[in-house]
Image: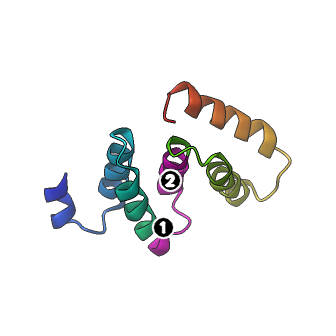
């Protein structure tokens, strides 16, 4: 994966995958540095934001994780009327996958 990142350093798919792998192996500090680096460049990137939310769940930063999900929902929908139901479904699915 690192060879691909060297060849394509700005590729979001590869870097998001690395964030997810680092998170899965408990290397939270490196994952957080990488995800924050790319979110500075692409702040509205949905997959990257979801990866950060999962990372924060793993770090037990529940409030921060929930904020990311809420912000993404607001961006996609432009209103909060469906927020509670969708958030609870997404949060429940993330927890079922034991990403925390």
From the top left corner, tell me how far across and down residue 14 is, in percent. Answer: 29, 54
Where residue 74 appears, as percent x and y from the top left, is: 73, 57
Q: Give residue 26's quadrant in the image.
A: top left
Please name whichever residue, 58 or 15, is drawn nearer the observer in this view of the structure. 58
- Residue 69 percent coordinates (x, y): 65, 50
Give the extent of the magenta segment: 40-56
Q: Residues within 10 Å of mark 1 (few under 14, many from 20)?
A: some
Look at the numbered disc 1 and give the secondary structure of its residue. Answer: helix
In the picture, the disc for residue 39 is 1
Q: Which residue lies furthest to the bottom in this view?
A: 41
Q: Which of marks 1 and 2 is nearer the N terminus?
A: 1
- What residue lies at 78% left-to-right and 46% top-to-bottom? 83
Q: Is residue 94 above or below residue 19?
A: above
Residue 82 in the image: state x and y as whole percent. Answer: 81, 43
**Residue at point 64% right, 36% down?**
90
Question: Is residue 48 within the magenta segment?
Answer: yes
Which class describes the residues within 10 Å of circle 2: few (<14), some (14-19), or many (20+)?
Answer: many
Judge from the rendering whether residue 63 lies leftward or rightward of residue 61; answer left or right.
right
Q: Residue at x 50, y 53 (%)?
A: 52
Disc 1 and disc 2 in contact, CB within 8 angstroms: yes
In-front residue for pair 26/22: 26
Q: How far apart are marks 1 and 2 (CA)?
A: 9 Å
Q: Mark 2 points at which residue?
A: 52
Task: Give the structural element (helix, strand or loop) at label 2.
Answer: helix
């Amino acid at each position: 994966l690192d060879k691909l990142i060297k060849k394509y350093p700005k590729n979001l798919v590869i870097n998001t995958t690395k964030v997810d792998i680092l998170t899965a192996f408990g290397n939270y500090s490196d994952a957080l540095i990488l995800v924050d680096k790319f979110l500075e460049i692409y702040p509205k990137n949905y997959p990257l934001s979801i990866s950060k939310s999962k990372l924060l769940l793993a770090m037990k930063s529940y409030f921060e994780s929930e904020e990311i999900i809420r912000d993404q929902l607001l961006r996609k929908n432009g209103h909060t009327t469906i927020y509670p139901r969708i958030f609870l479904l997404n949060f429940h699915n993330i927890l079922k996958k034991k990403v925390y």
